[in-house]
Image: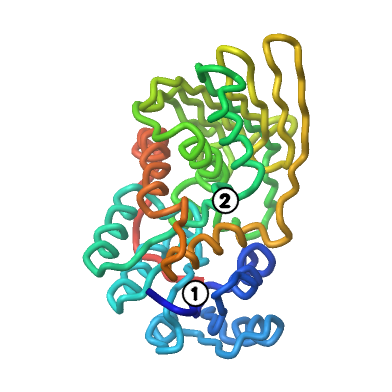
């Protein structure tokens, strides 16, 4: 067990500014001691602004730093496998951003390497530790909506207009593993896994209806949880408006919530309706990071691991496999940005 978790960040970009970087510093028993970007000037600037002692422009140098005993990989998914394997090779636990990797095969490589090295692997599906989703989990366990029958998800967004700009990495499948479905729907699929257990059989379609960006912009699915609950999902990223809605329907009522908002609505068969708002913390990853730190220090456990996260990649692979077989292969040699 470790006394203090001394983190090094690989890829100190936007996600680390508020969501995670300060959380590594604020969590009890945790310190942020080093950061890395290929652009050394940006790494130095981040270190100066956040009060971090060391900065690097080389990931292997940060991983080898004896002051660093845990690695946080905050790069695009294309590099998660590479850096997780390097960290495992020197016996350091790894925390990677979501999705865990570009595909399920890369997830399995990461799990195998960490198992062989005897190190822990965690993934930033931080909703598993947020108070709102744990309240939903409590409501389900209480039986207030009876036996769960069905889950419905509908997520709509308007077309991401990029003009003549360089495409964001999130819609470059060689970097992300797909389009916005991979980036955003992964959160929903993971939290449903947390609330209702693993998803088993998956069937669906993926398409590019807008003709832009060469990635999927519509995914529909019907799937079955191992528990027998059935799910229906639609994600469209070229729609007329924005919508973020999940419904868990039971024999006595339903719970409605968004993946990215802060509200919960409970409707019961007797006409009762309850609505509440449960705010997210200022640094949204802090509750999950605290759970990771606690596990590494031997005082608790984290609800988001490589094992749970790999299940979400498997589901997304099932839904996107035919689309990318038809259009392109998500693979190739890439370099970290």
**Corner quadrant of residue 210:** top right
The quadrant where residue 138 appears: top right
Q: Report helix, strand or loop for mark 2.
A: helix
Q: Is residue 115 above or below residue 255?
A: below
Q: Is residue 97 left or right of residue 269?
A: left
Looking at the image, residue 184 sits to the left or right of residue 263; the answer is left
Rendered position, 163 above or below 197: below
Q: Is residue 228 visible?
A: yes
On the image, the x and y values in percent for residue 111 come to 30, 57
- Tell me the residue that label 2 is attached to: 129
Between 78 and 127, the residue placed more toward the observer is 127
Q: Mark 1 vs mark 2: which is more N-terminal?
A: 1
Viewer-proximal residue among 110 and 144: 144
Query: Which quarter shows the N terminus?
Result: bottom left
Mark 1 sits on what residue? 10
Q: Residue at x 53, y 72 (%)?
A: 11
Give me the residue at 44% from left, 50% from top: 177
């Amino acid at each position: 067990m470790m006394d203090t978790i001394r983190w090094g960040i690989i890829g100190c970009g936007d996600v680390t500014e508020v969501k995670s970087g300060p959380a590594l510093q604020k969590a009890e028993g945790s310190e942020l001691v080093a950061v890395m970007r290929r652009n050394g000037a940006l790494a130095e600037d981040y270190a100066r602004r956040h009060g971090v002692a060391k900065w690097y422009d080389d990931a292997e140098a940060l991983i080898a730093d004896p002051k660093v005993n845990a690695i946080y990989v905050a790069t695009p998914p294309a590099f998660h496998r590479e850096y997780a394997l390097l960290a495992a090779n020197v016996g350091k636990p790894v925390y990677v951003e979501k999705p865990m990797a570009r595909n399920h095969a890369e997830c399995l490589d990461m799990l195998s390497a960490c198992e062989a090295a005897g190190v822990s692997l965690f993934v930033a599906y931080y909703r598993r530790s947020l108070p709102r989703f744990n309240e939903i989990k409590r409501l389900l366990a209480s039986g207030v909506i009876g036996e769960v029958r069905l889950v419905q998800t509908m997520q709509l967004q308007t077309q991401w207009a990029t003009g003549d700009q360089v495409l964001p990495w999130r819609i470059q499948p060689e970097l992300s593993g797909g389009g916005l479905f991979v980036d955003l729907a992964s959160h929903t699929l993971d939290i449903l896994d947390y609330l209702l257990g693993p998803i088993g059989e998956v069937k669906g379609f993926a398409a590019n209806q807008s003709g832009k960006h060469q990635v999927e912009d519509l995914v529909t699915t019907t799937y079955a949880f191992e528990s027998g609950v059935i799910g229906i999902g639609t994600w469209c990223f070229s729609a007329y408006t924005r919508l973020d809605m999940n419904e868990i329907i039971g024999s006595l009522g339903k719970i409605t919530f968004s993946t990215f908002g802060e509200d919960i609505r409970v409707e019961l068969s007797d006409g009762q309706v309850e609505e509440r708002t449960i705010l997210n913390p200022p640094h949204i990853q802090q509750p999950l990071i605290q759970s990771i730190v606690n596990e590494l220090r031997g005082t608790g456990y984290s609800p988001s691991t490589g094992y749970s996260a790999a299940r979400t990649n498997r589901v997304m692979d099932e839904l996107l496999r035919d689309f990318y077989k038809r259009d392109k292969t998500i693979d190739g040699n890439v370099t970290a940005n």
